[in-house]
Image (cartoon, rainbow, N blue to C red):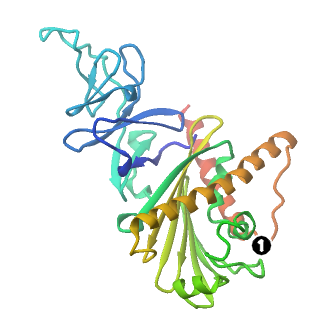
Amino acid sequence: MIINQWYIACLEDELKVQNPLKKKICGEELVIFRTESGKISVIEDRCCHRNVNLSLGYIQGENIKCGYHGWEYNCDGKCVRIPSLSNEERIPAGAKVKAYTVIIKHRCVWVWIGEDARIDESLIPPMSEMDEYPMVYNYHFIDADLQLVAESLFDAYHINHVHRNSIKGMMGALKDERMDFNMQVSENAIVGNYFRDNDRTLFEKYYFGFNKKVETYFGFWFPNISKLDIRFKKRRMVIYEHFYQVDDRLVCMCQITLWKNILDLFPPFARWFMLRKSINIVREDIAFLENNKRIKAETGAKDLLIKSDEVTFEFIKLWKRKTTTHEKLAEKED
């Protein structure tokens, strides 16, 4: 569980008044809700009365109301009303649950999991496309290794094989199976780009452009955001993946697909098409991600990396450096 980080609790689009949203991130059960005035809050998903999930309840004005006995909690996690108490009786001082620090940015509700003293807003990755492009998103729960899930999106060499039937030539092809990557590695991130061959059908070339190469950008921001950015002559498609450990076994992955100047005349069809394509692509990835974890668990085998896996090498170095630092800080605090 990688804590002292920002995680996307949900997209703003997921929140509806009257309907609290239940999430589990890094083993912590959360309830996200929007009050009638529009304020968004995240608190512990537990009523301290009889220890049931507050997400089973509903929104009452500016509070969330437990569906079991009607106890109401405000955005700070404090119980502010108990229906069975008279107005003269005081609510117990211990009637409260944990409240989380929240930031609304890039149409997402970011929640800080960890110590409040270490909150750093600059750790939220730059995702400016989220502020302006149309998008679709989908969630998946995967029995896979978090590190491999984090790398999957920007692994250039798997696209020709894993997605040979779904993507085909839409993103361009790696004809010679060997790429020249330009990379920049910082304290918390890897960003870079490379070029893919424009190996599409005549119709796709007419729509996306006849340029010989497709410029592709990629990025990873520790520990939970990956990016693939395909730039055509006049159009663009951006994919973000957000991932985190749910519990000791499952990883949650949300894939967000955004686009510019693609199917603009038919927005409903564009959303349907992009969502359908996105779900199919993720399912193809999941088969290999889960297979990798099972085989390693059963055999104890290690990955055999080669020279062309240069992006993977840089990613692993960053991942090990950051997780080792995290483990040392945790040991020090214990």
Q: Residue at x 28, y 40 (%)?
A: 17
Residue 136 placement, left or right of 48:
right
Q: In the structure shown, which secondary structural element does the residue marked by tag 1 occupy?
A: loop
Q: Which residue is mark 1?
A: 308
Query: Does 2 sit above or below residue 310?
Result: above
Q: Where residue 115 sits: x, y (%)?
A: 43, 39
Can residue 318 be seen from the camera position used here? no
* Number of residues whose C-alpha sits closer than 10 Å to that of mark 1, classed few (under 14), some (14–19) or many (20 or more): some
Q: Quadrant of residue 278?
A: bottom right
Residue 176 visible in the picture: yes
Residue 194 falls in which quadrant of the image?
Answer: bottom right
Q: Residue at x 63, y 90 (%)?
A: 212
Amino acid type assigned to the residue bearing label 1 in the image: Ser
Q: Nearer the viewer, residue 26 or 229?
A: 229
The residue located at (83%, 51%) in the rendering is 302
57 is higher (above) or lower (below) than 307: above
Q: Position of residue 316 (x, y in %)?
A: 69, 58
